[in-house]
Amino acid sequence: MRLVLDQVRQAFPSADGRGGQVEVLRGCSLATDDIRSLVLVGPSGGGKSTLLRILAGLDVPTSGQVSFDGTPLPRDARGRLAWRRTVGTVFQAYNLFPHLTALDNLLLPLVHVHRLTRAEAVRRVQEPLARFGLAEHAAKRPGQMSGGQKQRIAILRALVVEPSILFLDEPTSALDPEMTAEVLEMIRELRDQGRRLVLVTHQMRFAKKVADEIAFVADGVIEAHGQATAFFEMPATPRLAGFLETVLA
Amino acid sequence: MTGTQAKRVAVHTAVVAVYAGLIWLAAARVDYAWNWEGVWEYRGMFVKGWLATVAISLAALVGSCLIGVLGAICLQSRRVVLEAVVRVYVELIRGTPLLVQLLIGFYLVATAVGLENRYVAGALILALFSGAYMVEIFRGGLAAIPRGQHDAAAAIGLSPWQSFWLVVLPQAARIVLPPVAGQLASLIKDSSLLSVIAISEFTLAAQEVNSFTYSSLESYLPLAAGYLMLTLPLSWIAGMLERRFHFDA
C-alpha cells in the first residue's frame, strides 16, 4: 500500500467549554513507498492514535488529505462507513461486545455487514480460530477470557472480513508481558503472511522487527519517517534520538 | 436451606408477626369490632380491582419505557430542539405532584381532545408521569456504555442504527433492568391515585367496600397486602437482577 498524507490537521473543541479548540494534529505530511507494514511510534499525546483513527475512517480530519494507493479517503459519513467495511481496526481495549460469546462477536460483522448466512459465517471462522489456537474459547463470553485472548479474538474479528488493511492502535498496551507476547506473535505471523498493517505501538523492539517503514509522530507532526533499519540506526532528529534512547534503554 | 438462611427467615417472620400483633393490639384497645365476613362477601370487587391495577400498571410501564428510550436518545442527539423538548417535559413532570397531573390531564386535556375512556386516559397520564423518570434511567444506561464500544461497532462497519440495535441497546437493557423493575413497583403504588378520577382499580375498590360495610381496617389491610403481593416479588427480582448482570468489558 502507498500512503500519502498531505498537511493533515485535526482539532477538537477544547474541554473547558469556552469554545476554543485544541489542535492535536498540526499538519502531518508523509509519503510511503509501496509497503506492507507501517508502524507509528512516538510519545504519549503526540497524535499517533488520532492519526490512526483518521486512517481507519473513524474521524474526519479538520483539513488535509489522506490517500491510500492514490484514492483519497472519503470525508462524508457514508463514504467513511463504506471504507470501514473494507478495512479492520483493533483498539487497545473494549473491542469485544460483552453480551455476546467470542463466536458471536466474530459472526456479527460477517452476518450483519457482509451478508453471509450464519452457516457460511461459522464455516469461515473455523479455520482461523483453529490456526491461532482460539477454538476452545469460542463459546466463552469476554468476561471469561484473559486480556490476551480477548485481543486475539478482536484481531480475528477484524481479519475474518478479509480487510484490505488492518489498523491496530496500541493493541498490547493494556496487557501484561506474557499476554503482550502472544498478541505480538499473532501480529508478526500476519505480517509474515503479507497482511497490510498500520500499527501504533510502544513496543520498539517489535516495531523494528515488523515494520517496513516507521513514522515518528510527536507534537502533532510527523517528525521523522523512513525505512526501519535507517530509522533506528541513524535517527533523523535529536528529538527522535532522545525518544529512542529512552524507550530502548 | 442453610443454617444462617433459616435463622434469617425465622427472625424476619417473627418481626412480621410482631407488627401484625401490634395492629391487633391497637384494634383491641379501641374496641374495634372485626367484621371480616362482611368484607369477604365483596371479595370479587377486590379481585377485579387488583387485576385492573395490574393491567393499568403494565400498560403504563410499556408506555413509560418507550418514552424513556426515545427521551434518552433525544438527549444524546445533540440537537438543541430535541434536547429542549425532553428537558422541559422532564422538569415539569418531576416538579409537580402526580395528583395535579391527573386532575389537569383528565379534566382538562383528555376532555379537550375528546378522550372519554378513563382507563386509557389514566394509563396514559401514568405513563407520562413515569416516563419522565425513565428518561433519566435510560440516559444513565446509555451513558454507562464505554465509548470504546461505539468505536468497535463503527470499526466493524455497523451503521449507526445497527450499532444501536445490536451493540448498545442489548447492553443498556441489562444495565437498566434493575432500576426499571424498581420503577414498576413505584408505578403500581402510584396507580392508587387513579382512584381520584374514578378509575375502578384496587384502591377505589377498597374504598367502595368500606363505604358499603363500614369496616375500614378489613378493607384497607387487604388493600395493603394486595400491593405487597406485587411489590415484594418485584423488589426481590430487582435485587437478583442487580447481582446477576455484570460482565467485564
Image (tube, coloured by chain):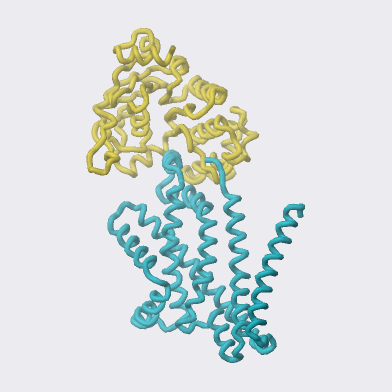
Chain B display color: cyan
Query: At which x and y percent is residue A231?
Result: 36, 12
Q: Nearest the camera: B183 or A150?
A: B183
Residue visible at 28% across and 38% down in the picture: A12
Q: Quadrant of the N terminus of chain B?
A: bottom right
Query: At which x and y percent is residue A84?
Result: 40, 38
Left or right: A100 as drawn, with respect to A17: right
Q: Nearest the camera: A18 or B115?
A: A18
Left or right: B189 as drawn, with respect to A211: right
Query: At which x and y percent is residue A43?
Result: 36, 22
Residue extending furthest front? Answer: B29
- Residue B86 falls in image quadrant: bottom left
- Residue B33 falls in image quadrant: bottom right
Chain A display color: yellow
Query: At which x and y percent is residue A18?
Result: 23, 43
Residue extending furthest top? Answer: A233
